[in-house]
Each structure stands twice: as structure tokens, then as C-alpha cells.
Amino acid sequence: MTTGSLLPTLIIVLGAIGAYLLLPHRHGRTKPRSAHVAGAALTALGFLGFLFSIMEPPSMSKPDGHFYIAATFFYVFSALALGSAVMTIVSRNPIHSALWFAGVVLSSAGLFLLAGAEFLAAGTVIVYAGAIIVMFLFVIMLAQMEGRAMYDRSARSPGTAVFTCFLILWSLVYCLGSLATRPASGGGEVTFEPVPIPAPRLAATYRLADNNSTKIVLDRALRPTSAAQNAQGLEKPDVAGLGESLYTDHLLTVELAGSLLFAALIASIVIANPSRSLRSDDPEFAESNA
Amino acid sequence: MTDLLTIDYLRDYLLVGAALFALGMLGFLSRRNLIVMFLSAEMMLQGTALSLIALSRYHGNWNGQVFTIVILTVAACEAAIALALIMILYNRRASLDITLWHELREEAAPAVVPALEEAATAELVEAIEGPETYPSLTPAGLEPEHPIQPWTERRR
């Protein structure tokens, strides 16, 4: 491990300890207020470290003094999404969890907008925040009419879970750490770390070859209907371009998604309908099928 | 914003997606409420969708967004079936606790004592005043007779 990866490791360990202190106790015992305060402080430290050290904000102002609005909004939405995600998993009340999850969905819809996916931002808000959250809230209200429950105050093996998940986060951060255009320090000579090549340039390289599998795959993935820019290099409008790609290159996917929705509709009706018996050895089965 | 993402932006998007994924996994593994577990699974899907959209922007290609549409579809199907299952499980045990279903194991596997029973057999500890203590009232007198409403009777 080099010294460059020491600071991210420290930040992630801080976040892990904070998340462990904030999660409910294993046996549902009450945690003292000091544990909550320490957990909140450590999580906040890890959170700020993740935002400002691991993510390395690009310069917020252009050389001529103008302000990058997109970069600012990116940071605001990222902070909102991650903070709401932490609150979703540490809230003791499932209704609060569902509402914080709505916060995660709304702020990641903002991130989608910044990445130029307007249709998906709207679709995510409608599908998640509009339909799924409301359904979850209905189920919570049906199932937990008495309010607070014991099992919301206790966690299943929180230590192991925190270790596993933050190990995954650490390894992902470690892998992504090599993605940078920063010149590697050493010997005064400026050498750049390897970066993933954007697809069009990669395709231009591989098109020179006569016949190999990578070329075939790239040619399929980079048909002009799939590209975000038209032949003149201009940006296609979002919904029109996405629809063109969806209904020419991915027609079979659309059909499959429709079949999947239909199958899920029938399955949920069959599962949730308690009046009919599905087992053939049940005496009610013979009656209902008589 | 007509230009494609730079590599630094791509990295930041992927980091946010990775953090959402890890936090969702933490919630799925550690929480005991079925609903919160499914919310955490949806959060993992959200992190993946964010990474796909950022890569789609970086490569100047619609394929990542098409994948995200598929993820949305699968998430909607998953939520429908999960809620149907939750209703069935709730009607059997009158609780949303996942540890009540620990006996769904192979026959040779040893039985796992649910954490609540383990806690009940452990010695009692003094409740510490804090944000998690619930108010308790001293029971006074007999519980009065009250008719059981049809919408509450399946709880008992």
C-alpha cells in the first residue's frame, strides 16, 4: 500500500466506525447518547473526507472568474444523496427510512440531469418517488399500525455487515483511484496514469483491423443510432435520441421488459391473493376447482 | 452542457455510485425490517444506475441509458413481487421481522437462535436514558373490555 492510498483508507475506516455506532444495537438494547454523538461525528468526518478528499473536486471557477454552476450542483446533489442514504439505513422508524430514500432518489435524479439524462431523471422521479415509495408507505401503514417495533431497534450482526460493506467500498475506491489525469509525481517527468479510452476513439483504432471479435462488438455497440451525437458532431435531443436507440438497436430488450412487467403483474396477483389455494393436496383446491 | 464528461467527472460519478451501492448493501445486511431491507436493495440499484448513466455520457452512447431503463423495469417488478410477498409473510406471523423466518433452512443445518430470543434469555440491563428509550407507563387496574374491530383482529 502506498502513501497515496492511506488517506482514503483512513477516511473509509472513520466512516465505518461511525456507521457501526449509528446502527442499532445487536440485541436491541438502548445505546447511550454519547455513542450516537460519536457515531454522528465520525460519520460526518468520513462523509466530508469522502466528498472533499476522495472525490477531489474539480476547480469550481473557470480561469476567467466565472463560476461552474454544474460542478457546484454536482457536489450539492452528491452530498444530499449520500447523506440521505446514511439516514435511510440508520433511521429507527421505517417511515423515516422510506422518506429519506425518496431523498436519495430525488438527488440522484438531479445527478442524472447533470449527466444529460433528462428522460431518465423524470422517469426515476415518477417511478421511484411517485410509485414505489408510496406503495412502501402503504405497506408500512398496513403492517405497523402500532408504530414502533422492537425489531427496528436491533440489527442483524452489524459488525460483520459494516466490515463487509466498507471493505467493498474501500476496494471500489481503490480501483477507481487509478482513474485520473493527474500527472504521476516522480522524476520530474510528466507521465499520465492509464485512463479508459472513450468508445469512439477505441472504435477508430479497432476498425483498422480486418476481422476480430472486439471489432464486431464495437461496431454493434457504436451504430449511428446508438451514438449521442449525429454525423455532424452535434448533440441529439435527449428523448428523441434515446427513443431512436431504444426502438432500433434494443427492440428485443423493450419486448423483454414488457413481458417481464406482465409476468410480474400476474405473479404478484397470484402471490397476494389469499382466497385461492394453489396446492393440489389441499382439500380446498378440489372445492375451488370443482 | 453539450460536451462529454471528463475523466475526473466520470470518476466522481462512479465514486458516488459505489458509495450508494455499499450503503445499500449495509442496510440490506444489517436491518431486520423487511421493508427497509427492500428499500436498501433499491438503493443498490440506484447506485448502479448512476454509474451506467455516467459511463453512457462518457462514451457518448445511449446504451448505458437503455440499461438504466431496464434496471427501472426490473426494480418496478421487484417491488411489486416483494410487496406481495411481504403481505403474505405479514399475514402469517403478524410481523415484518426477518429473523422470524430463520427456520427456512436445510434440514441438516443447525437451528439459529433469533437475536430477540437470545436477548430475552440474556440478563436484563438497566435502560440508559437516551434517544432510543421509549416511554413506559405503569399498568394500572384491569384492561377494560373492548370489542375487537375486524381490522385489528388478525393481529392476535
Image: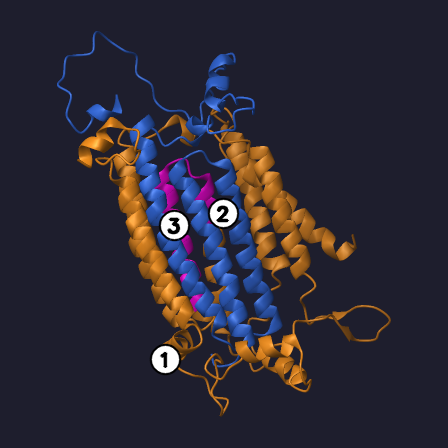
> Which amino acid type corresponds to the residue marked 1 in the rendered image?
Ala
- Circle 3 packing at 10 Å, graded few (<14), some (14-19), many (20+), is some
Left or right of A155? Residue B15 is: right
Q: Quadrant of the C terminus of chain A?
A: top left
Do pointers 2 and 1 mark residues of a single chain?
A: no
**Chain B shown in which color?**
blue
Q: Nearer the viewer, residue B152 or A189?
A: B152
Farthest residue, direction right:
A187
Q: Are marks 2 and 3 in contact (CB under 8 Å)?
A: no
Range drawn in magenta: A84-112
The chain coloured orange carries which letter?
A
- Crowding at dot 1, Cα within 10 Å, few <14 / some 14-19 / many 20+, comes out as few
Where is residue A93? Give x, y as percent.
Answer: 37, 36
Q: Dot 3 falls on which chain?
A: B
Residue marked by disc 1: A240
- Of the image marks 2 and 3, the number of the one nearer the N terminus: 2
Amino acid type of the residue that numbered disc 3 sits on in the rendered structure: Glu
Q: Which residue bears the numbered disc 3?
A: B78
Q: CA distance from mark 2 to mark 1?
A: 33 Å
Asked whether the viewer can see residue B94, the reply is: no
Find disc 2 in the rendering and name its residue: B24
| Callout 1: SS | helix
Drawn side of residue A6 relative to residue A11, left or right: right
Q: Which of the two discs, 1 and 3, sits closer to the camera?
A: 3
